[in-house]
């Protein structure tokens, strides 16, 4: 996954004709890289537990009045709150919407 994002950056830099753009690829900070790897592992594990697309599990679960859809909503909200609070541990900022 990381290789694909680096490839995308390189391709975008090659296709942009603007001379003032710095074409060097800057390596991400180690904490950001660790956060991305950990997030990817957790996301992949969660996808395996959910047997596929988690949004589909949510929408189809709510639409069919199934308990798992509502549990998914509670777990997703709790995970979002936890993830937002853990961002500073990786040196990431929490953005305010204004």
Image (tube, rainbow, N blue to C red):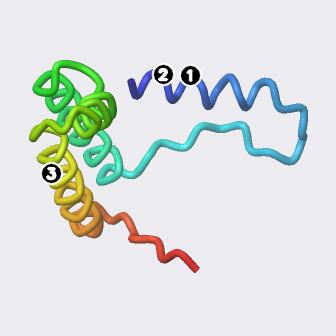
Q: Is residue 15 left or right of residue 38?
A: right
Q: Quadrant of the C terminus?
A: bottom right
| SS at circle 2 | helix
Q: CA distance from mark 1 to mark 3?
A: 34 Å
Q: Quickly name the residue at label 3.
A: 75
Please name the residue shown 12% across and 47% down the image.
71
Residue 43 drawn at (x, y percent): 23, 34
Residue 1 position (above or below residue 83): above
Frontmost of labels 3 and 2 is 3
Callout 1 touching callout 2 (CB < 8 Å): yes
Q: Is residue 3 left or right of residue 39?
A: right
Mark 3 is surrounded, within 10 Å at the Cα level, by few (under 14), some (14 to 19) or many (20 or more) other residues, namely few
Please name the residue shown 24% across and 20% down the image.
52
Q: Nearer the viewer, residue 16 or 83?
A: 83
Residue 80 drawn at (x, y percent): 26, 57
Task: Name the disc covering residue 65, or none.
Answer: none
| SS at circle 1 | helix
Residue 35 position (above or below residue 53): below
Residue 61 drawn at (x, y percent): 22, 34
- Residue lying at the far bottom of the rendered structure: 98
Q: Quickly name the residue at label 2.
A: 4
């Amino acid at each position: 996954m990381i290789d694909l994002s680096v490839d995308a950056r390189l391709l975008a830099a090659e296709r942009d004709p603007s001379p003032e753009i710095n074409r060097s690829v800057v390596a991400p900070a180690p904490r950001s890289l660790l956060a991305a790897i950990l997030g990817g592992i957790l996301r992949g594990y969660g996808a395996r537990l959910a047997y596929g697309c988690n949004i589909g599990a949510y929408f189809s679960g709510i639409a069919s009045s199934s308990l798992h859809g509502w549990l998914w909503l509670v777990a997703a909200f709790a995970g979002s709150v936890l993830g937002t609070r853990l961002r500073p541990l990786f040196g990431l900022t929490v953005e305010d919407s204004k």
